[in-house]
Image (spheres, rainbow, N blue to C red):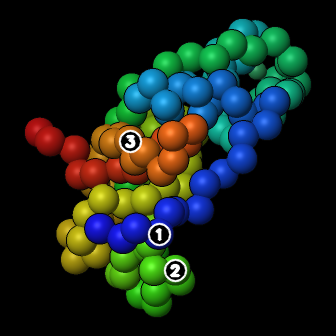
Amino acid sequence: MSEIPRVAPIPGPINQEFYDGLNRHELLLQKCRDCGKFRFWPIEMCPFCNSFNHEWARCSGKGTAHSYTVQHQVMHPAYPAPWVVLLVELEEGPRLVTHGLMPPEEVEIGMPVEIEYEKITDEITLHAFRKAEK
Ligand SMILES: [Zn+2]
């Protein structure tokens, strides 16, 4: 493993709950209290019904590979190449871009995936997704 740290995001007031959840190995997304829909990225207003009334709700961590790309060039020594960049559609509806924890030759659109947690620093854990077990 590389000794060079991965690039870590800097949480702010709007997404602190999201990162706090990842640190506890929980995928929390905003859920509208009026229409009941989940959304991602964190924003103040529901994009479906314009409500400001929301809660943070735990997601299953399961979804499907909606799309992907493969990064072949080494951007930074801490990142392996090739690197699968996965667009996951969660069971709850939102899609998120994440690290695909599978070799590029095994990734397929529509494949079931489930969450893993990658600790990047003492303060930051990121989501990543691997092929779901049956
Ligand atoms: Zn809503």
Question: Which residue reaches farthest bottom?
Answer: 73
Up/down of 15 relative to 87, above or below: above
Identify the image quadrant of the C terminus: top left
Picture quadrant where residue 117 is located: top left
Amino acid at dot 1: Ile
The residue tagged with tag 1: helix, strand or loop?
loop
Q: Are marks 3 and 1 in contact (CB under 8 Å)?
A: no
Q: Dot 2 corresponds to which residue?
A: 76
Q: Do the residues labelled 2 and 1 touch (CB within 8 Å)?
A: yes
How many neighbours does mark 2 have within 10 angstroms: few (below 14), some (14-19), or many (20 or more)?
Answer: few
Q: How far apart are marks 3 and 2 (CA)?
A: 21 Å
Amino acid at dot 3: Tyr
Up/down of 44 relative to 122, above or below: above
Up/down of 124 relative to 45, above or below: below
In-front residue for pair 113/36: 113
Residue 126 visible from this viewpoint: no
How many neighbours does mark 3 have within 10 angstroms: few (below 14), some (14-19), or many (20 or more)?
Answer: some
Amino acid at dot 2: His
